[in-house]
Image: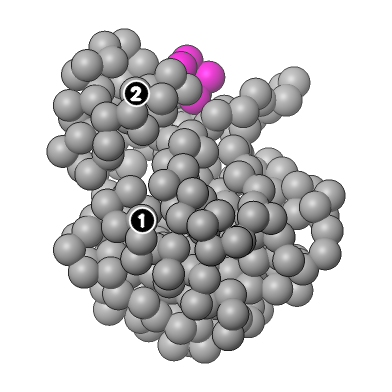
Amino acid sequence: MTKVFVHGNPETSVIWKPVVELLNDRRINDIVLLSPPGFGSPTPKDWGGTVREYTQWLADELKAIGGDIDLVGHDWGAGHVFRVLAEYPGIVRSWATDCVGLMHRDYVWHDAAQGWQTPEVGEQMVQGMVDMDADTFVAAFGGLGFPEDIAREMKQGIDAEMARCILALYRDAAQPAMRALGSRFIEQSPKRGLVIIAENDHYAGPHETHEEIATAVGAKVRHLEGCGHWWMLEKPEEAARMLAGHWIK
């Protein structure tokens, strides 16, 4: 069974490196890291960066891999997972994601997202990220739990095309888009799910909203104490144990 990981924004697949190494130590080696177009992989010709395009991209990648797939999503990677599960029931054997609260009916986009969704303001924000020198970037993301080598490698992937895709994706996902997705997701009730709640991750709303959606679809819940949005970097050993246990059951 193939383990497929999908990362988010403003990331590249390097964020999974510590967890993948620990999974390899457990003899879990059939792992595929998918980078969404513009986020560590090239964008196709005429790529608009819309929610629909990313959903179709992920569906096509999963179909090409084939067989039984255990899918893992983080941040916007989780957002792509939610939409694929809502539109292609049964496409994977199991799923595990954080950020489930994004789909809650009461969810309000966090401050950075609202900035990206605002004309001119968003353009200034993403340009600032592109122009930021590597040392400043490493210092900023080090405060968020990034090891220096991971932050430096990720910074190399932050370019003008990623900036364009950030704006397009967040603007296309402005409310009520996420509320509508939540309704479709719950209606499909994808099986064998794991909802990951990092104690200090506040990007996707209160923990109670994650738990409500998990209950609605019959998913398991795992709380990760003492870490934030990038739990896979802050507690890779616990993340690897959690995922390996989820796949066995």
Task: Locate the N terminus by quadrant.
Answer: bottom right
Task: Locate the C terminus by quadrant.
Answer: bottom right
Rendered location of residue 79, percent (x, y): 51, 55
Is 5 inside the magenta-drawn segment?
Answer: no
148 sits to left or right of 240: left
Name the quadrant containing residue 135.
Answer: top left
206 sits to left or right of 14: left
Q: Toward the viewer: 92 or 215?
A: 92
Q: Residue at x 17, y 63 (%)?
A: 226
59 sits to left or right of 36: right
Where is mark 2, residue-wise?
Answer: 152
Question: Within 10 Å of the Cα at label 1, are there few (<14), some (14-19), or many (20+) other Cα atoms?
Answer: many
Rendered location of residue 139, percent (x, y): 17, 26
Where is mark 1, residue-wise?
Answer: 236
The answer to whether residue 106 of the structure is visible from this angle is no
What range of the chain is rendered magenta? Answer: 158-162
Q: Residue at x 63, y 73 (%)?
A: 94
82 sits to left or right of 140: right
Rendered location of residue 108, percent (x, y): 30, 58
Which numbered circle lies on residue 107? none
Q: Is residue 43 above or below residue 143?
A: above
Secondary structure of the residue carrying numbered label 2: helix
Q: Toward the viewer: 114 or 2?
A: 2
Q: CA distance from mark 2 to mark 1?
A: 18 Å
Tags 2 and 1 in contact by the CB under 8 Å rule? Answer: no
- Give the residue type at disc 2: Arg
Q: Residue at x 66, y 25 (%)?
A: 43
Is the stretch drawn in magenta largely helix, strand or loop?
Answer: helix
Q: Is residue 179 above or below residue 146?
A: below
